[in-house]
Amino acid sequence: MDALRPYTVVVRIDSTPEGYAAAEYASSLCLKLKVKFRLIFLFVVALYRRTGLQLINRQTDQLNADIREDAENEMVRCKQFISRFESLLQYEWISIKDEGNVGPIIARFIKDSLQAPVDLVVVGRTADVGIKKIVGGHVSDYLLANLSCPVMVVKDTYDVSDDENDK
């Protein structure tokens, strides 16, 4: 690793207990690093692919509208969760929307769109939802098989009751 380049950690965040655990783990790790780091929280909205059939596309468009609406609410919850780290460390928030499954979307983003090498990807052990779960499986399995950088899979879950007790 180039000594001038920050150690780059990308965290796939979602509003599941596993997603929160991954965010907490990555934040804790970065606080312990003795080198300059770049922490990126990556929020992914995976939409259904459109087809060449107009009748199916109408249904797909409706499903995708629902996904976008749900994603907006989920994004607010995720940003609220990671706001607890604002006074402790600097981080970046990146939100991407694309067609397909979450795993391939993340892999493409890391390989093609992120303008810097990634040293570590942190992800919770979660699966795609709905029909994508049957086709896509676990996001972490896909990333382990398809990324050339280390992938840390956080199998623990974040206990949201801790947040409820703090209120």
Image (cartoon, rainbow, N blue to C red):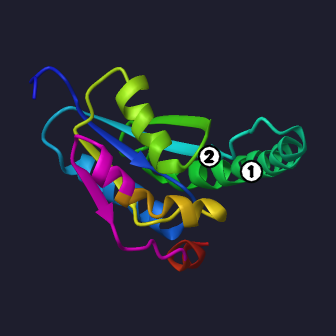
Are discs 2 and 1 less than 8 Å apart at CB? Answer: yes
Q: Secondary structure at mark 1?
A: helix
Q: Amino acid at mark 1?
A: Ile
Residue 68, percent across and down? Answer: 75, 45
Left or right of 107? Residue 64 is: right
Q: Which residue is mark 1?
A: 67
Marking on residue 46:
2
Q: Secondary structure at mark 2?
A: strand
In this view of the protein, which residue sits in the foreground, 137 or 157? 137
Q: Residue at x 45, y 67 (%)?
A: 18
Compare marks 2 and 1 and give the one earlier in the sequence. Answer: 2
Residue 121, percent across and down? Answer: 31, 47
138 w.r.t. 32: above or below = below
Residue 24, percent across and down? Answer: 38, 59
Residue 39 placement: quadrant: top left
Q: Amino acid at mark 2?
A: Ala
Left or right of 26? Residue 128 is: right
The region drawn magenta spans 142-160
Residue 114 placement: quadrant: top left
Q: Residues within 10 Å of mark 2 (few under 14, many from 20)?
A: many
